[in-house]
Image: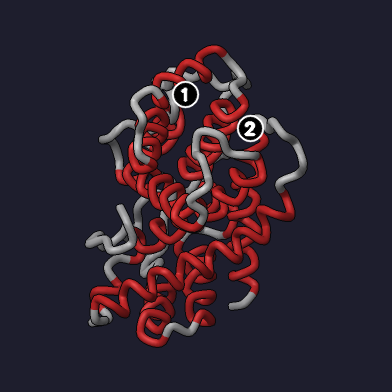
Amino acid sequence: MGTSTSSTGPGSGVSLDPPWLDDVVGDIGKGSAVTPSDAVPADSPAGPMGNAPSARYGDARREFGKFAKTGNTEHLRKAIGHYSHRGSGGASAAASRMRASTSAGAALFSFLNAISQGTSAEARHWVDALRATNPSADYVVDAIIRELAPPGGSADEESFRDAMDFALSEFIKEDPTIDPLNMGVNDIWELMKGYLATEAANRLCFDLGPIFESSQLDPRTAVIREREMRRFLKNEIGAHVDLLQGHSANPTRSQLNGVLQEALKMTFELFEADL
């Protein structure tokens, strides 16, 4: 999906919660050769009820356009607050709409933790087979993503694959000593912040439409705004992840999904309170 999407976003009168979303959640990591240590997949929160109101994203688009032109993050805060409050049905509903994102994040955390700790013969074999090919960092990132979310599927699946790719690639670029096949728990938590920020940015841009393009920004400024948005979201969401993450070395996927869902909900609530 990325943030430079040509989508005009969902309109008014449609269900706040896509009926196919739970199928996407159920398929995450389904074909992986590495079985998670917790046999029970992440709990999926109930989706919001009802249909979207008319002009659901009008205020959010207006504020987002101001951010695109000026770079003032106060406009971005208001845009996200309006997106959550009117556009999505409130903070809980906005977080629930992103349950495929948080389920995929929980699966990514669990997978990276399993292969790093060698928690099963399957995990050790998967790592050994991959290392035997002397892979580049990019190839390792691609292999991890393919294991959890093969190509194809819905816009949501395209989005969280993009977010996994971007977050992992940026994390390794910032610290080339990082081995994605042998990451500590603290590093994986830090990765989650970048992943969730990228997913939130993807979601906003997909739903609100091509505002960077329609604001007639030059390409360089558009790229800068996208980076500023991801950095802003990482700081805000990351603060809540830090608050909620706990100290377990082996959190279950349900625990992880709960942390990521609550971090999103708290972030949306914070922005709604600024309206």
Up-down relation of residue 274 to residue 177 (above or below): below
Instruction: Report the residue at 33% width, 61% height from top.
Output: 3
Up-down relation of residue 72 to residue 186 (above or below): below
Secondary structure of residue under mark 2: helix
Number of dots carrying numbers = 2
Asked whether, in this view, residue 48 is left or right of residue 225, the answer is right
Residue 14 x %, y %: 35, 52
Q: Nearer the viewer, mark 2 or mark 1?
A: 1
Choose between 93 and 264: the one closer to the eye: 264
Is residue 44 something one can see in this rendering? no
Q: Name which of mark 2 and mark 1 comes first in the sequence.
A: 1
Q: Work out which quarter of the rendered image holds the C terminus and state it.
A: bottom right
Callout 1 crowding tier (Cα within 10 Å): few <14, some 14–19, many ≥20: some
Secondary structure of residue under mark 1: helix
Asked whether, in this view, residue 83 is left or right of residue 260, the answer is left
- Residue denoted by label 1: 127
Q: Which mark is residue 10?
A: none
Asked whether, in this view, residue 104 is left or right of residue 150, the answer is right
Choose between 16 and 178: the one closer to the eye: 178
Residue 181 x %, y %: 50, 33
Residue 77 x %, y %: 53, 75
Occupied quadrant, residue 212: bottom left
Choose between 70 and 123: the one closer to the eye: 123
Instruction: Report the residue at 52% width, 47% height from top.
Output: 177
Residue 60 x %, y %: 43, 73
Choose between 44 and 137: the one closer to the eye: 137
- Under mark 1, the amino acid is Val
Q: Tell whether label 1 touches label 2 (CB within 8 Å).
A: no
Q: Residue farthest to the top?
A: 121
- Residue denoted by label 2: 254
Occupied quadrant, residue 109: top right
Instruction: Report the residue at 75% width, 36% height from top.
Output: 248
